[in-house]
Image (cartoon, rainbow, N blue to C red):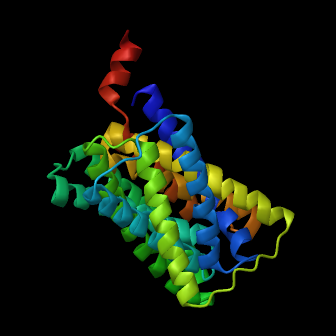
Amino acid sequence: MKNKTALYFLICSTIWGLTWIAIKFQIQAVDSTVAVFYRFIFATAVMFGLCYYNKTNLKYTAADHIRFGLQGLFMFCLNFIVTYWASSMATSALVALAFTSLIFFNMFGARIFFKTPFENKVVWGAILSLLGMCFITLNEYQHIVSEPLSIWGFLLSLMATLAASCGNLISTKNRQLKIPILSNNAFSMLYGSIITLVYCLTMNKNFHVDTSVPFWISFIYLSIFGTVVSFWSYLKLIDAVGPSKAAFTSVVSPVIALVVSTLYEGFSWNIYLLFGVVFCIAGNLVALVKFRSLIKRFAV
């Protein structure tokens, strides 16, 4: 990968690896669905501010706005509402694990909708990563047995991942139409926020927030870094390597989430986790690194 592409990958993986624990602080202070609305309406304001500062085009056709609305529904509404629900039922590590399925959702979605052929190294990388996640899931088995509710959290996370993948594919289409990332994200977040607000009002959700220092730190982190910065980087990554390879961020971020969960949730390491992390890293290397280029560099 080129230097900028590697940087986008690192930004997304690191930021999202820390968001899982930040979400825990959010749902302790406010209703989970309302937390999604607050997060994205604030991020929307920041995005439009950036559009104004950069003099980004904000005039689009009705068809463009329909795609913005659909991307907002899947990527910035359903994806996060369901993820927040899942986070109230399962550990942040288990929720993060489910998101590794994004690789396969994106891979098959790109094949179906954009006729993108399967790359052998991406397929092998995905298989290695899946094997790594299987080892990590074995470690979570005891937790699932002791707390049956966590399996529902895991299944909800899979549904959230499917929604995220739909958003990824719509975003890919928007980028093919040369729509700038700033305006694409600004309008998509706006529509996602509106849909979330309508849901909150319909369900009579409580908008009260028990403010505290952890809440404000997590709110700023999730809104600015976990939304504005990370999604800009992620869509740039999709531009560079396509949705299939970009989805490998969903393998690295859970590994980071495991480390964070170890520190804050008492998550314990063992041989399963060790093998899991090794296979996950190997899968990323196989799918994303051009070994021939590396060999040539070392040879030179």
Name the foreground residue: 105 vs 203. 203
Residue 292, image x and y in percent? 30, 25
Taking 171 as reference, is 255 left or right?
right
Which sits in the foreground, 189 or 241? Answer: 189
For the N terminus, the quadrant is: top left
Q: Position of residue 3 (x, y in %)?
A: 46, 26
Viewer-nearest residue: 275 or 81? 81
> Which residue is drawn at the image coordinates 63% and 59% (left, top)?
42
Q: Is the residue 286 above or below the residue 103 in the image?
A: above
In this view, 174 is above or below 42: above
Q: Is residue 127 visible?
A: no
Picture layout, residue 258 above or below residue 238:
below
Q: How many marks?
A: 0
Q: Which residue is pictured at 38% across the width and 16% down the height?
A: 297
Q: Is residue 167 left or right of residue 56?
A: left
Residue 167 in percent (x, y) is at 36, 61
Q: Quadrant of the C terminus?
A: top left
| Residue 12 appears in the picture as rendered | yes
Residue 38, image x, y percentages: 64, 67
Left or right: 166 with respect to 187? left
Outermost residue toward the right in this view: 213
Q: Residue at point 49% right, 60% down?
A: 189
Name the residue rendered at 46%, 29% in the picture.
4
Quadrant housing residue 23: bottom right
Residue 84 is drawn in which quadrant?
Answer: bottom right
